[in-house]
């Protein structure tokens, strides 16, 4: 547990849901950049982009919460076993 793997956010496995949301976000962002130059349908695309980013952020927070809970639970088990 103390070898630097658990509790280190760089080692948290990204979920399938997060990667799907990230893919959607990248798609929308690319589309937004293309349409910004033409300046049409901008408001609708901006809403999609913002919504996608919010969903992605929510999934990321859930992943971090779950990892933190697991770490705390393992630490509690270690403490009670001493």
Image (cartoon, rainbow, N blue to C red):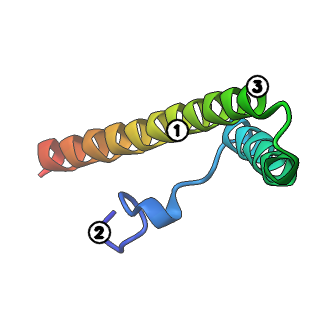
Alpha carbon separation for disc pair 3 and 1: 20 Å
Q: Nearer the viewer, residue 22 or 49?
A: 49
Eye-nearest disc, 3 or 1 = 3
Q: Position of residue 43 (x, y in %)?
A: 71, 28
19 to the left or right of 75:
right
Q: Position of residue 42 (x, y in %)?
A: 77, 34
Q: Position of residue 81 (x, y in %)?
A: 17, 46
Q: What is the number of the mark on residue 57?
A: 1
Q: Earlier in the sequence, mark 3 or mark 2?
A: 2
Tell me, for residue 2, which label it has, or none: 2
Q: Nearer the viewer, mark 3 or mark 2?
A: 3
Residue 58 drawn at (x, y percent): 51, 31
Measured in 3D between alpha carbons, the distance from the residue under mark 1 to the one under mark 2, in whole angstroms, is: 28 Å
Assess whether mark 2 and mark 1 are in contact (beta carbons under 8 angstroms).
no
* Badge 2 density bin: few <14, some 14–19, many ≥20, Cα 10 Å: few
The N terminus sits in image quarter: bottom left
Separation of residues labelled 3 and 2 (CA atoms): 48 Å
Circle 3 residue: 44
Mark 3 nearby-residue class (10 Å; few <14, some 14–19, many ≥20): few
* Disc 1 secondary structure class: helix
Asked if the residues shown at circle 3 and circle 2 are in contact, with their CB atoms under 8 angstroms apart, the answer is no
Q: Is residue 55 left or right of residue 11?
A: right
Q: Secondary structure at mark 3?
A: helix
- In primary-sequence order, the first of circles 1 and 2 is 2
Toward the bottom, the furthest residue is 3
Q: Which sits in the foreground, 53 or 80?
A: 53
| Towards the viewer: 60 or 74 | 60
Given contact means CB atoms under 8 Å apart, are the residues at marks 3 and 1 in contact? no
């Amino acid at each position: 547990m103390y070898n630097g793997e658990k509790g280190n956010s760089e080692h948290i496995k990204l979920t399938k849901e997060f990667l799907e949301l990230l893919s959607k976000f990248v798609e929308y962002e690319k589309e937004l950049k293309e349409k910004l130059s033409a300046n049409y349908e901008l408001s609708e695309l901006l809403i999609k982009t913002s919504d996608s980013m919010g969903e992605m952020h929510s999934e990321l927070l859930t992943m971090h919460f779950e990892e933190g809970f697991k770490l705390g639970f393992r630490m509690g088990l270690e403490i009670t076993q001493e």
